Image: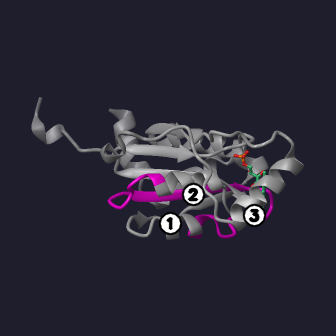
Amino acid sequence: MNVNDVEIQPKILISYYTRSGNTEKLANQIKNLVGGDLFRIEVVNEYPPSYQEVLKVSKVEIDNQYKPPIKNYVENMDEYDIVFVGTPNWYSTMAPPVATFLSMHDLSEKTIIPFATHGGGGEARCLTDINEMSSQATVLEGIAIYGSQAETAKNKMLMWLKKLQIFSNSLRELND
Ligand SMILES: Cc1cc2nc3c(=O)[nH]c(=O)nc-3n(C[C@H](O)[C@H](O)[C@H](O)COP(=O)(O)O)c2cc1C
């Protein structure tokens, strides 16, 4: 093999929390567009299935900046260069399990790319709060998509990733 043909590709992790599946749809689209490993953040104590109940429980968590324990941990985080961090908009910020995830991992040398889904309130503080919690990382421009449009957001996702110049690098990898 000619060493000049070898190009080092960034290693990508796509981490996300989802309760009702919307944010997971975006995570899957990112994977389809740029590759990478998916990591679904899972809580030890599941939130109640009832929407009204989860509104109550999560409000208390967010008001107290409580970080609920999560089941899983990325043992090999040092292998990743780019870490996408996905969250639903919960009370205008990230869902608490995402805050737990950010606080448990050393992301200081990483490029972080936040993404969010929402129910009409837009990105609110979701993306900037992820940015603030990742203060020693390089944080690129995120995206927020209306949850009910997550399925059909592929073009928006594509434009966003192209703008970040993630897409073109990885496209080469996909064509190899
Ligand atoms: C506890 C809770 C709080 C929410 N708060 C907001 C909010 O403040 N603004 C908003 O636009 N959507 C809000 N939503 C709607 C979710 O952001 C939206 O449905 C999202 O797409 C769900 O993502 P998921 O399917 O990945 O869990 C909230 C949903 C829940 C369960």
- The quarter of the picture where residue 129 lies is bottom right
On the picture, is 135 further left or further right than 144? left
* Rendered location of residue 12, percent (x, y): 40, 45
- Magenta region, residue range: 104-128
Is 111 drawn above or below residue 31 in the view shown?
below
Task: Mark 3 and ligand 1: say if the CB distance to the nearest ligand atom is below 8 Å.
Answer: yes
The Cα–Cα distance between marks 1 and 2, rounded to whole angstroms, is 8 Å
Q: Is residue 115 magenta?
A: yes
On the picture, is 35 further left or further right than 124? left
- Which residue lies under the disc numbered 1? 133
- The quarter of the picture where residue 42 lies is top right
The crowding category of the residue bearing disc 2, from other C-alpha atoms within 10 Å (few below 14, some 14 to 19, many at least 20), is many
Pointer 1 with pointer 3, Cβ within 8 A: no
The Cα–Cα distance between marks 1 and 3, rounded to whole angstroms, is 17 Å
The tag earlier along the polypeptide, 2 or 3, is: 3
Is 1 drawn above or below residue 91 in the view shown?
above
Pointer 1 with pointer 2, Cβ within 8 A: yes
- Which residue lies under the disc numbered 3? 91
On the picture, is 54 further left or further right than 26? right
The crowding category of the residue bearing disc 1, from other C-alpha atoms within 10 Å (few below 14, some 14 to 19, many at least 20), is few
* Rendered location of residue 63, percent (x, y): 72, 67
**What amino acid type is highlighted by mark number 2?**
Ala
* Rendered location of residue 104, percent (x, y): 46, 52
Q: Residue at x 82, y 54 (%)?
A: 55
Pointer 2 with pointer 3, Cβ within 8 A: no
